[in-house]
Amino acid sequence: MHPVLVSAAAGYFLGSIPFGYLLIRLFRGADVRTMGSGNIGATNVARTSPLLGMVTLVLDLLKGTAAVGIALALSPANRTVAFAAALAAVSGHIFPIWLRFRGGKGVATGLGSFVLLTPKAVLLAMAVFVIMLAAFRFVSLASVTAAASLPLFAPVLSEAHSPQILMLAISSALIIFKHRSNMQRLLAGTEPKFKAPRK
């Protein structure tokens, strides 16, 4: 089987593992999709359990990294294969077959995927996230602007070339698409602001 197909299949499978859903089901006996925002990602999990939220964040990061790592091992001379795996991992997290294609927003999995492929661009995108969060205190807005900036930074820094840029752009577009309800709330003035935990 072609390395691209193997890498994409492995990437989707790893990305589709709904760690947030599984952890809440295992340790709380509840369905995280019926709680808070209904999202299976770390932010919503943390509303029930900060510890499980942190574990979810780490596992969602690692599944993206693992997907890309497998692709790089299978085809070390062809980075495009790894970009395909990264896109597949993000797609798997957002559209997991196990949860009827209703998954998370892909931010952590995208970060874990592309940190191996475009580390300098990821660092700049993280800086954008921090700046936007500090300035406006909306996690969703910071996530969207960081996701939008990544496919712009990567080619400038010579970390991605066509068709890799296209795969990166599609991944970012999927993440932004999953934040559409947040954007609607931002426009309506009802999106909650980030509050730092008190000591």
Image: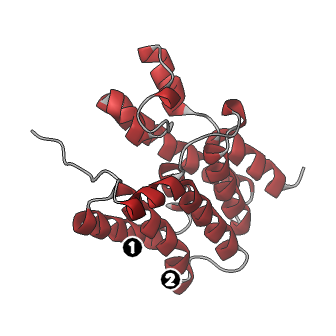
- Is disc 2 in contact with disc 1, using a CB cutoff of under 8 Å? yes
Q: Position of residue 28 (x, y in %)?
A: 42, 16
126 left or right of 26 in image? left
Residue at figure coordinates x 53%, y 49% from the top left: 105
62 left or right of 98 in image? left
Q: Looking at the picture, which amino acid does disc 1 mark? A: Leu
93, 185: nearer the viewer: 185
The answer to which image quadrant residue 96 occupies is top right
Kind of element beneath mark 1:
helix
43, 63: nearer the viewer: 43
The answer to which image quadrant residue 45 occupies is top left
Q: Position of residue 95 (x, y in %)?
A: 67, 44
Residue at figure coordinates x 44%, y 35% from the top left: 56
Rendered-image quadrant of the C terminus? top left
Q: Residue 78 has which mark? A: none
The answer to which image quadrant residue 129 occupies is bottom left
Q: Which residue is mark 2?
A: 157
Q: Position of residue 154 (x, y in %)?
A: 53, 77
Q: Looking at the picture, which amino acid does disc 2 mark? A: Leu
Q: Which residue is mark 1?
A: 124
